[in-house]
């Protein structure tokens, strides 16, 4: 069976998700160092 | 247990089960039963996905993990958002377009029946065992601390889940999971507030974090490249992405959650919701463990949190030696408590921190010596006590009524995961094995009845596995290892299907068989920490399949 090539759609919410999780990592870093 | 706790526990669980049963009874057809009639909105999908992953052991084990080793475990989830995006962009649109009931159904349209059957079979072995352990893990802990009968508890958890899962299928799983997540969030927030409230009057939340940091418990991120260190930023980001891709993208217990959504968009939004909440939720659960650690800096703690272990050793010839260790531990704690007070009131923290860390090392040694004494009794009890820390705190420090609520949290978590597992095991057995390989010419009603029957059978099997799990050493770890052995291979097959269009069915099937053999040999000979087997299996099956395809193409070309 020959399938049509898939088109992958990027949505804004994916970008927000990555940004949110990058912010979590930065907050964790600050959190680690803030109380030392 | 106090009567008030019993009332709260029984009322909470009974409400969830009865509500779930009445709200969703009377599925009319297979689609109703296995896909919930495709009515779920994104928040239902998101909560259902989270509830499926968060088993009882998550709530029992993670705070204990933070208590002993700090917050590094959160890194394990850093790959989840990346995996959510890949699944939303690649996996879900295909599943929706083909209107599949199970993930493995797609593999037949892309490859062939044998590849579909193989992956479905691998799923059933792994998830069937895991369903038993999902019931067994909280049962063994609750039976140890509360003295409840292990087998009775296994049967109660299994039966409660079977009642609404057999009756209402996927819709019942989603409806009950929303309430279970409500109970879980409420219980965790109350536990956190009470732990902070139970700290000494003169220790503020900020002081508590300072003390936790000085005791090396706030080490959330580790950027080192140590291969043997299980939880680093890199293993979480790379290994965690592969693991999350396998779990959320190809494991039917998760796929079925988002296939029940009313549209493609609702499925995607449900997973994105999970991607936003997963890391902070795990961070919060670990923070509870850290606060519990601070609490036990100012309050006495047992040498080993598993009461069964302590009971055995105190009834043995090693009792005096053990009591001596307990006294030393308490003396050590008192010294540490004083140093912690000095720490929060001084500017020059480094020397105090060093002294605290020395006392922590001493505490670790004392606890290790305690474990050796428990082992010497030669009784078969769990000496790794991380799963017992949180429940010890709950039973000894929470007010009456709230103990019942927190026990409801643990049992709700066990039930929500088990329900998804039974539901997906039944779907795969009905759709991928029974309907496709055995009997395809029957009516819709016949397959609806078959789905119900398979749910019941898998429920009974899960309870039997839970009741016999105690006979095997390290069964929980064994199930995780089995997961890692199969997951990578299955993910690789799906990635080949999605992205490497020139690879055909025979190459994939042969590669899957070869990969499975190599991965088992690799695990047996301890080539790498087992969490990395996922990535290894995935890369291996893809490479072998591509190689076979290229070689067979060039051979055909030469012949022609």
Image: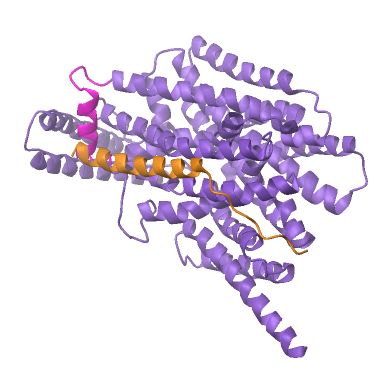
* Percent coordinates x, y for residue B31 in the rendering: 79, 36
Q: Tell me the residue at 13%/41% (across/down).
A: B355
| Rendered colour, chain B | purple
Chain letter for orange? A
Q: Nearer the viewer, residue B373 or B203?
A: B203
How was the colour assigned to the protein in this rendering? by chain
> Magenta stretch containing residue B316, yes or no?
no
Q: Residue furthest top?
A: B4
* Percent coordinates x, y for residue B402 in the rendering: 45, 16
Q: Quadrant of residue B520?
A: bottom right
Q: Quadrant of residue B291?
A: top left
Q: Is residue B521 visible?
A: yes
Q: Nearer the viewer, residue B264 or B449?
A: B264
Q: Is residue B251 visible?
A: no
* Percent coordinates x, y for residue B72 in the rendering: 35, 45
Q: Nearer the viewer, residue B330 or B325?
A: B330
Looking at the rendering, the stretch of residues picked out in magenta corresponds to: B199-218
B361 left or right, relative to B527 = left
């Amino acid at each position: 069976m020959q399938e049509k090539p898939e088109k992958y759609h990027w949505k804004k919410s994916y970008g927000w998700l990555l940004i949110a999780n990058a912010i979590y990592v930065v907050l964790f870093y600050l959190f680690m160092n803030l109380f030392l | 247990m106090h009567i008030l706790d019993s009332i709260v526990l029984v009322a909470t669980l009974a409400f969830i089960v009865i509500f779930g049963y009445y709200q969703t009874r009377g599925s009319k057809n297979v689609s109703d039963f296995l896909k919930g009639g495709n009515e779920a909105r994104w928040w239902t999908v998101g909560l259902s996905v989270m509830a499926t992953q968060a088993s009882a052991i998550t709530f029992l084990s993670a705070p204990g993990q933070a208590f002993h080793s700090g917050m590094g475990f959160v890194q394990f989830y850093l790959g989840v958002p990346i995996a959510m995006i890949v699944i939303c962009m690649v996996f879900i649109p295909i599943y929706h377009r083909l209107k599949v009931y199970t993930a493995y159904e797609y593999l037949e349209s892309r490859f062939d029946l044998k590849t579909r059957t193989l992956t479905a079979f691998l799923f059933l072995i792994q998830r069937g065992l895991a369903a038993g352990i999902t019931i067994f893990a909280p049962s063994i802990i609750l039976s140890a601390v509360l003295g409840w009968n292990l087998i009775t508890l296994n049967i109660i958890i299994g039966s409660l889940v079977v009642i609404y899962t057999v009756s209402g299928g996927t819709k019942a799983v989603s409806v009950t999971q929303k309430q279970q997540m409500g109970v879980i969030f409420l219980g965790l927030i109350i536990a956190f507030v009470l732990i902070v409230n139970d700290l000494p009057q003169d220790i503020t939340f900020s002081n508590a974090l300072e003390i936790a940091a000085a005791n090396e418990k706030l080490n959330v991120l580790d950027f080192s490249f140590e291969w043997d260190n299980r939880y680093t930023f890199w293993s979480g980001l790379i290994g965690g992405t592969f693991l999350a891709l396998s779990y959320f993208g190809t494991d039917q217990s998760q796929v079925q959650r988002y296939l029940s959504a009313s549209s493609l968009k609702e499925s995607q939004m449900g997973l994105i919701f999970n991607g936003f909440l997963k890391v902070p939720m795990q961070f919060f659960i670990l923070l509870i463990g850290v606060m519990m650690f601070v609490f036990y800096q100012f309050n006495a703690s047992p040498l080993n949190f598993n009461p069964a272990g302590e009971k055995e050793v105190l009834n043995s010839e090693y009792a005096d030696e053990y009591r001596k260790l307990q006294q030393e531990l308490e003396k050590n704690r008192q010294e540490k408590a004083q140093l912690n007070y000095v720490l929060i009131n001084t500017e020059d923290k480094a020397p105090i921190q060093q002294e605290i860390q020395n006392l922590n090392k001493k505490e670790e040694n004392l606890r290790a010596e305690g474990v050796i004494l428990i082992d010497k009794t030669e009784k078969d009890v769990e000496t790794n006590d991380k799963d017992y820390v949180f429940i010890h705190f709950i039973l000894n420090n929470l007010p009456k009524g709230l103990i019942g609520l927190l026990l409801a949290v643990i049992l709700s978590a066990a039930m929500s995961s088990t329900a998804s597992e039974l539901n997906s095991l039944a779907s795969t057995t009905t759709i991928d094995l029974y309907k496709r390989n055995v009997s395809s010419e029957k009516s819709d009603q016949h397959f609806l009845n078959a789905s119900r029957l398979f749910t019941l059978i898998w429920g009974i099997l899960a309870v039997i596995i839970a009741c016999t799990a105690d006979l095997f050493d390290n069964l929980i770890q064994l199930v995780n290892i089995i997961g890692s052995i199969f997951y990578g291979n299955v993910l690789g097959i799906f990635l080949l299907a999605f992205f490497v269009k020139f690879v055909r069915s025979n190459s994939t099937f042969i590669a899957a068989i070869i990969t499975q053999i190599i991965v088992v040999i690799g695990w047996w000979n301890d080539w790498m920490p087992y969490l990395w087997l996922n990535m290894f299996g995935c890369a291996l099956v893809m490479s072998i399949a591509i190689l076979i395809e290229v070689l067979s193409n060039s051979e055909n070309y030469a012949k022609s």
